[in-house]
Structures are given as structure tokens and as C-alpha cells.
Amino acid sequence: MNRTLSVVRLQLVNKQTYVWVPLLVLGGAFVITLAIFAMLPVEGIVGGGAQAPMWYFLVVGVQSLTLTFPFSQALSVTRREFFLGTMLTALLASAALTVIYVLGGFLEEATDGLGTGSVFFQVPGVWAEGWAPAALAYLVMSMAFFQVGFLSATIYKRFGALVLTAGLIVVALALLVGVWLLTRTGAWGDFFGWMGGVGTLGLTLWSLPVLALLALVSYASLRRALP
């Protein structure tokens, strides 16, 4: 456990990756969105800028492996300890981001969108079932973006750019086939009806097995990855 916590400290040596850059991305998106709200003569706008830090978590996932994995091996940290410590660091950073989202949502609710009448944090679909399901959704989405970045980096380290690129193409083709099947069978209505039926909490819980699978594949690739 101590060596796992040492990996957490190793990941946080460069605080820009997990702390300052995500806060800068969120703060910049917030200020720009408020400026746009102020310039538009309408209320009730739902801004999409709050998702910007989550996309950056994909980059964090890549950097968590490429920037620190070689140092961890030089310090005789096992791959299992590195994996657990890195996941714990990502979970702590995602939890901190989730707290900001929830507090921002409460602030928006209390001030009518800081006087703009529009929404940045309290996205209707995500907050439809209350703050607790919304918080869980933000936490899982942040970890999902991180896992995708970390998995991509481990595959690159283990198999190289050719396999990584081929894998991304296969995933894109699989998604395209899914869209084609829904279109050909006219099942888009049922699909969106199912999503609306299970709600934010249901979709979040459904995504947990996928998240676990990504973590398992990442760990399997990391065990044979070269520093």
C-alpha cells in the first residue's frame, strides 16, 4: 500500500497534469461561456463548455503513462503498484472535479445562472434525477475519458503505433456498423426511448462494466509494456 501511495505522490510531482491544467481548462471554458451568455439576448441556453475538462482527462490518461512509467520502473515499482497508484490518482482528481461540478450546479440554481438565466454546470439531462446521480455521472465520465487515454498509451507502449492505429480504426468501424444497424432497422426511437427510460443513474451504472473492462485490458497491456 505504501508503494501504491508513493505512485500517487509520483504522479502529483508535476501538479500541472492533474491539478492546474484541468482547473485552467474549466475556468477558461466557464469565463468564455459566461461572456457568450452575456452577449446573447435570450435566456435558457445550455452551454456545453463544462465537458471541456473531461476531454482533457483523456490527455491526462496518456500522460500518466508516458511521463511517469519509465521513472517508476527505475524506482523498482512493480507494474501492479504503478497501475493501482495511477488509478487512485485519477479517481482523486475525478472526485475533485466532480465536487466543483456539483457546487457550481448549486450556485447556478441559487443565482439563476449567475444572473444570466442560462446553464453551464447544471445540464438538464445530467441533473434530471438530482445532484447525487449527477455527481456519480460526472465521476464516471471523467474516469472513462482517463481510462481511454491510459488504455491507448498502454497499447502504444506494448504493441506500437501500428497496432494502436489499427485498433482505433476497428473501434470506429464497429461504431459505424452500430449506427448503420440502428438506421436500417429503424430502431433509433427504441434506442433513445431506452436511454430516457433508464435515466442518468441507469446509464451511469450500465457504463461501469465497460469501465472495468477498459481497466482490465489496460493492466494486461501494462504488464508487458516497455518503459
Image (spheres, helix red, strand yellow):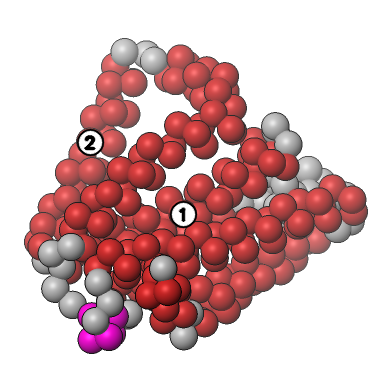
Question: Does residue 159 show up?
Answer: yes
Element under disc 1: helix
- The residue closer to the viewer here, 94 or 181, is 94
Give the position of the C terminus as an image quadrant: bottom left
- The residue closer to the viewer here, 10 or 21, is 10
The residue depicted at 30 percent of the width and 43 percent of the height is 213
Q: Position of residue 68 (x, y in %)?
A: 32, 80
Q: Position of residue 210 (x, y in %)?
A: 36, 39
Q: Looking at the image, is 198 positioned above or below residue 222?
A: above
Query: What residue sits right under mark 1 in the picture?
Result: 143
Q: Looking at the image, is 53 positioned above or below residue 74?
A: above
71 magenta-colored? yes
Q: Which residues are magenta?
A: 70-75
Task: Give the Cα separation between the discs numbered 1 and 2.
Answer: 22 Å
Question: Does residue 59 show up?
Answer: no
Q: Which numbered disc covers residue 161?
A: none
Residue furthest front as drawn: 1
Does the magenta stretch mainly form a helix, a strand or a loop?
Answer: helix
Q: Position of residue 70 (x, y in %)?
A: 24, 81
* Pointer 1 or 2: first along the chain: 1
72 magenta-colored? yes
Element under disc 2: helix
Q: Which numbered disc covers residue 174?
A: 2
**Identity, as a three-letter code, of the amino acid under mark 1:** Met
**Identity, as a three-letter code, of the amino acid under mark 2:** Ala
